[in-house]
Image (spheres, rainbow, N blue to C red):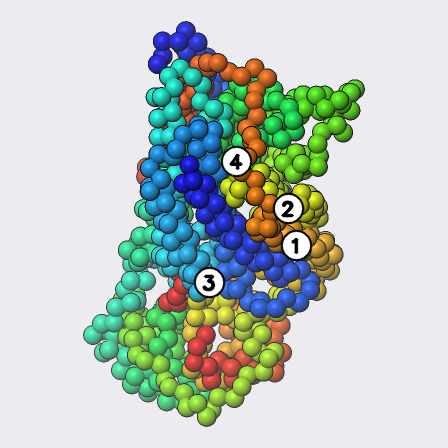
Amino acid sequence: MSTDPLDRPWRLWASVAILSVFVFSVLFGFVLLPIIQGRGAGLDAFESICRALGLRPGSPAAPQPASEAKAQPTTRVAWSAELMQALDRPSAIGAQLAAACTACHGKDGRSVDPKLYPDLAGQSAVALYKQLNDFKSGSRLSAVMAPLAQPLSEEQIVAVSAHFAAFPVRSLPPAQMPAPSEAIERLVARGDPTRAIAACNACHGEQSGGPPEAPRLTHQGAQYLSAQLRAFKSGERRNDIYSRMRNVAAVLSDSEIEGLAGFYSTTFTY
Amino acid sequence: MTHARRLALAHFWIGFIAFAIALVLGVWQMWVRSPLPAPFLTASTYFSSVTAHGTAMAYVLTTFTVMGFGYYVAETALARALPAPRWAWTGFWLALAGTLMAVVTIFSGRAAVLFTFYPPLIASVFYYIGLVLVVAGSWIWCVLMIVAMGQWKGANPGRPVPLAMFATVANAVMWLWTTVGVTLELLFQVIPAALGLKAQIDVGLSRTLFSWTLHAVVYFWLIPSYIAFYTMVPQAAGGRLYSDTMGRLTFVLFLIYSLPVGLHHLLMDPHQSNAFKFLQVALTALVSVPTLLTVFTIGASLEIAGRLRGGRGLFGWIGALPWERPLVLATGLAFLMLAFGGFGGLINMSYGMNAMVHNTSWVTAHFHLIFGGTVVIMYFAIAYTLWPSLTGRAAPSLAAQRLQLWLWFIGMLVMTLPWHYLGLLGQWRRVATFNYADPIIAAWGPWVIVSLVGGLILLVSGLLFVRNLLQFAIGRESHVPAEVYATAVHPPLRVPAALNGFRLWNVLVLVLMLLAYGYPLAQFFIIDPPGALVHRVDQRR
């Protein structure tokens, strides 16, 4: 095949042309440009080349600013794959610890008074874990829950969260379920872009794309849900990351808060 | 020879049916984003719709069209029966099964991750397996194209492979290279996560692997249009191809400079360094070489045709061209859209300017103009050109074809030019609804509505396209297929092996890929960064 005298120069010059463009780009982008940029930023040549290559952090064109951030995180929970897996496994320790919860939340996680205390049965273990952690750290304030959560270790919080999540949710008598108004359904499914309200379902829905810690809202008492929305609205409750819930609740009217609470308290799905 | 014809028809129809459905979804999405109240709107229907639209347009329409066109070229340009037609049908059914699997998963609301996947979002595994089957079907096509060319070369030693087939095999070779990135991402990262085998996913690695595919995939879609420019348009215009060698060089350069350039899609991503981004941007700039070669060569070929038809003076030949022929008209319109889109592309690929338009509607508008405009209008023209020989019938009305092409061109400009402008104003992409009560966003409203009108024109044009193809059924029978391939001014008697095969270019691609992607990929294994938690969209924790 390659006996043709035309072939050899093609091989040679095509390779030379392509590789010389490559070498030029490398010299320019890996060496020349970083050195010039680094000079402006007061960096020596070696440092700026290392930065340009990604071997050291920072931009070759700017000195790395020292962080002076003083803000405190809203919550100290950090998710990891191991934590998520542990939250999927109910354990005997969880069952023992749960005895302390039964006075309000019931033996099987069904609240003794849904107006005041949320159901824990069937709630997402991730959401329970976050709330217990926040009660412990003081991110979420509660005179009742704080003293109960503070002595719990990380493992105990995981165990008790996984325990309650494993119970089946409360069944709702169908007679209690009025048809929701169209405006409320729209808020749930579509939100209200004119007020920058995302659909509730975007995080709390059956197939949500939202943060993992978003709790299930269905089957909870309406009074409990509306109390939480009002607490977010007033800023009394502030353990929502990025103020997500405070921003939404701030622009909800009182009747919308009641409507949404009623909607979720009487809905099976979502 | 009927095998390749039936294959080509089957492939084209699957592609065009997917196109028609996706077009309706696209218009609805424009409507949702506009200030006008749209029906069926929820966040999940919107993102499911965007996923379906992207999957159908980018993977189904394109892959099936490229495959169908390739089978046609392999049989007609080489004047030989297709090798192993049974395998070709296997590829077809595989890709079709994959398409159906992906589509059913999307419409059941379990795959709203958009067609570029965006890990750590994870959809139902059936969506990804469906796409893997589509790719597997296309790999069969690649092998068949390479085998067909190899057999022809064996039977015709020393003779140059016809340009149309050389270009088709260039695309097949490029596609094999291209799909490596996304296949690695799917097989080793995304599908294990979708199966629940992995709880974390290294998003930097998956984005880098996808970027490997992301630019070359666009050239995979584009090359059929370029094949038409080089091998069919000069013939349709009544002229000759100015240079066969320019064509070969163009396709070789596309092969080389479509691959080690993908980091220009990650210019704002923090996990890749400035230097490698710069390198790949510099290599991206070289794509202008085959593009300009093509503009020059096709311009010269059309000038030959225009002068043969009596055109005089500096520009007189342009008016003398047979614009009433759909393929010539489509080429003119495609070049205009390429000019607009190419200008926008220069801004996207420039490291600094990218920062202004990144994640804005500008980018969406850009790829609609280049792909939906330049590429797809040539798909229409290719279909119009091949249909007489595929169906054995003549087109009943060229006027309807011209009207359809004009509507597509007008619709595309009306849709994408305001869309670009909205991007400059800051309108973000991948967003379902906007707060038009905000005075700044309210000012976008009228332009979004203009875009929607463009979308409606495109819908009319797309439906007219399907109707025009169906109309062939009532056309008169014509059993003398017209010659579709152009002859070069100097038909090549022999060409160097470098321009008659891909061995040298494959080696160069390998070298460039190792140099340009080696460390950017290896760093994820050297540094071992933490993974992101898998976030399922098909179920709730």
Q: Percent from the top left, x then y, of residue B69?
A: 48, 38
Left/right placement of residue A256 relative to residue B159 reads right
Q: Nearer the viewer, mark 4 or mark 3?
A: 4
Residue at the far bottom in the pictured view? A175
Three-letter residue code for mark 1: Val
Question: Quarter holding the N terminus of chain A?
Answer: top left
Q: Residues within 10 Å of mark 4 (few under 14, many from 20)?
A: many
Q: Which residue is mark 1?
A: B460
Question: Which one is earlier in the sequence, the residue at label 3 or at label 2?
Answer: 3
Three-letter residue code for mark 4: Pro
Q: Is residue B36 above or below residue B81?
A: below
The Cα–Cα distance between marks 3 and 1, rounded to whole angstroms, is: 24 Å
Question: Which one is earlier in the sequence, the residue at label 4 or at label 1?
Answer: 4
Asked if disc 3 and disc 2 are in contact, CB closer than 8 Å, the reply is: no
Q: Residue at x 71, y 29 (%)?
A: B321
Mark 1 residue element:
helix
Q: Which residue is mark 3?
A: B107
Q: Residue at x 48, y 45 (%)?
A: B9
The Cα–Cα distance between marks 4 and 1, rounded to whole angstroms, is: 24 Å
Q: Which residue is mark 2?
A: B396
Q: Residues within 10 Å of mark 2 (few under 14, many from 20)?
A: some
Q: Nearer the viewer, mark 3 or mark 2?
A: 2
Question: Which one is earlier in the sequence, the residue at label 3 or at label 1?
Answer: 3
